[in-house]
Image (spheres, coloured by chain):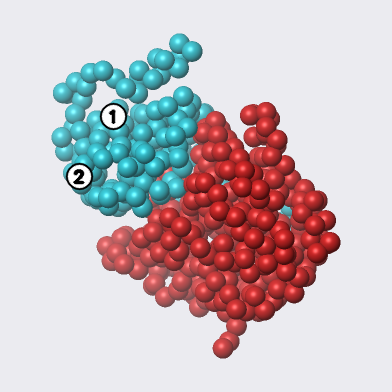
Chain colours: A cyan, B red
């Protein structure tokens, strides 16, 4: 119980220090694909009200994320585990009266957390590793491939693993995945 | 009019653990005269990599689209996640020249170029737009009269509106209409358009389980005998995970979850075996008994 409380405090800090604010952060964000409209957020709260995750989590609040971006609380945002709770259902994107793509902003922040803070939930590192190895995010066992054919399905086309690996390299993703520190699970309470 | 012809994009999770969806979809599409071509050398749609690097998602998706462009056919996705990334990528790269040039820079390294000459559709839009309701209605030989079901379209076949733009995300009609064509009744329930929760299950289980539990309750409360899905991730959440959700909340649902082509297939006279209904975690025994009686 006490642990839950301290975590809640961590996400709702009473004081924001001026030196924490990066006044240029919102301009940087507004140049990123999917986060262009961040400055138009007027904090109406539609995104949080309609967010299915927010209904079941005590601290995931899309409106707060938008405000933190506007304030330039970059470090705090990128280290905030709440970032990883968005299910990208895009309800907030469709409902925002200002056309702000909150889910897009969360995605940009996740990409920054990987790049700048080397943070990534373990599950995504595992999926990426499988993908680089096999072309699919799950390693499909040989027995499953055989069963397909027994069930009358055509053989699964073989992916071009060399091409996939090349794409990981040229987009800089292979390097990112190599250096990330993984986090196992994120509590929702 | 010539028959619709598509490259089938099975994705990763369907061949990994939900071949029942692919089996039933192929059977139904064949009966409806949709020609399926296997997609050579395809890779993951890119969707799960969007959290790591947006360019990586776009480039992985675009590589698949380039294959389709080369073959000269549109792509049909069975999975909402695959549809999401392939469709979004296809649209943004067609519209945004600067982004297209950037992604083409990466694709050049694997000898490909996105040209913007093909289309991406989800199974339900192939059925509603290419096959058409009339033809499906005529193919129903064993109407499922008296069967009461509910639908869960899932998020990415509807949202975001600016990329999908085919159905109303607030009040979706496509899957409901497709269900009604089978003769079954499609029931309305609370919060129909809400997410299944599966996309974050690798990071947190409590929230997705609570979301799925609420949906299963809402569906049960209106008296539905089954839930109908068109996405492997939604299906896993409601079918495969149903016993775990029951244990977590000490509740019993026993609600069968069918892939839409399984429901349609039954109405077209295909047998439960042909449609791989035995692969479902929650056995649809009662439902099948009722259909046999009708």
Q: Is residue B239 visible?
A: yes
> Mark 2 against mark 1, which lies toward the viewer?
2
Relative to B141, is B48 on the left or the right? left
Q: Chain of mark 2?
A: A
Q: Residue at x 26, y 18 (%)?
A: A14
Instruction: Name the quarter where the N terminus of chain B is drawn.
Output: bottom right
In the rendered image, which quarter is residue A129 located in?
A: top right
**Residue A91 vertical position relative to residue A158 in the rendered view, above or below:** above
x, y (%) of residue A48? 36, 38
Judging by the rendered image, the residue that carries numbered circle 2 is A39
Q: Chain of mark 1?
A: A
Instruction: Name the quarter where the C terminus of chain B is drawn.
Output: bottom right
x, y (%) of residue B124? 56, 65
Relative to B294, is A141 on the left or the right? left
Q: Is residue A155 visible?
A: no
Q: Residue at x 42, y 35 (%)?
A: A54
Q: Residue at x 39, y 35 (%)?
A: A83
First in sequence, mark 2 or 1: give its number: 2
**Viewer-proximal residue, B233 or B253?**
B253
Relative to B123, is A168 on the left or the right? left
In the rendered image, which quarter is residue A103 located in?
A: top left
Q: Secondary structure at mark 1?
A: helix
Judging by the rendered image, the residue that carries numbered circle 1 is A75
């Amino acid at each position: 119980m006490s642990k839950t409380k301290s975590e809640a405090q961590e996400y709702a800090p009473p004081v924001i220090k001026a030196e924490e604010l990066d006044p240029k952060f919102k301009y940087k964000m507004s140049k990123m694909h999917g986060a262009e409209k961040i400055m138009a957020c007027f904090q109406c709260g539609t995104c949080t009200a309609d967010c299915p995750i927010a209904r079941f989590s005590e601290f995931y609040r899309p409106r707060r994320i938008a405000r933190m971006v506007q304030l330039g609380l970059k470090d705090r945002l990128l280290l905030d585990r709440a970032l990883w709770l968005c299910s990208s259902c895009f309800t907030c994107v469709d409902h925002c009266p200002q056309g702000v793509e909150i889910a897009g902003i969360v995605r940009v922040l996740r990409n920054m957390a990987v790049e700048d803070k080397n943070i990534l939930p373990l599950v995504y590192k595992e999926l990426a590793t499988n993908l680089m190895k096999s072309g699919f995010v799950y390693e499909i066992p040989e027995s499953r491939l055989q069963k397909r054919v027994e069930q009358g399905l055509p053989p699964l086309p073989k992916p071009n693993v060399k091409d996939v690996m090349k794409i990981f390299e040229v987009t800089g993703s292979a390097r990112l995945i190599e250096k990330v520190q993984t986090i196992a699970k994120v509590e929702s309470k | 009019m010539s028959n619709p012809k598509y490259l089938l994009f099975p994705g990763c999770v369907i061949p990994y653990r939900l071949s029942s969806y692919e089996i039933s979809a192929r059977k139904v599409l064949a009966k409806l005269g949709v020609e399926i071509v296997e997609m050579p050398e395809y890779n993951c749609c890119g969707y799960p990599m969007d959290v790591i690097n947006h360019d990586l998602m776009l480039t992985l998706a675009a590589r698949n689209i380039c294959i389709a462009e080369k073959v000269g056919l549109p792509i049909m996705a069975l999975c909402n996640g695959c549809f999401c990334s392939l469709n979004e990528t296809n649209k943004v790269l067609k519209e945004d020249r600067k982004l297209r040039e950037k992604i083409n820079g990466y694709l050049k390294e694997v000898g490909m170029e996105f040209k913007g000459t093909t289309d991406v559709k989800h199974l339900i839009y192939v059925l509603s737009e290419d096959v058409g309701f009339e033809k499906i209605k005529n193919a129903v030989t064993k109407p499922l009269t008296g069967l009461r079901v509910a639908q869960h379209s899932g998020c990415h076949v509807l949202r975001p509106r600016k990329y999908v733009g085919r159905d109303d995300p607030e009040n979706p009609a496509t899957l409901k209409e497709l269900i009604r064509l089978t003769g079954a009744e499609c029931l309305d329930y609370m919060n129909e358009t809400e997410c299944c929760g599966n996309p974050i299950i690798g990071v947190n289980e409590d929230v997705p389980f609570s979301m799925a539990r609420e949906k299963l309750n809402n569906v049960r409360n209106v008296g539905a005998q089954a839930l109908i899905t068109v996405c492997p991730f939604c299906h896993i959440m409601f079918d495969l995970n149903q016993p775990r959700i029951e244990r977590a909340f000490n509740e019993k649902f026993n609600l069968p979850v069918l892939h839409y082509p399984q429901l349609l297939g039954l109405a077209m006279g295909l047998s439960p075996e042909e449609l791989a209904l035995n692969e479902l975690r929650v056995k649809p025994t009662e439902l099948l008994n009722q259909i046999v009686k009708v």
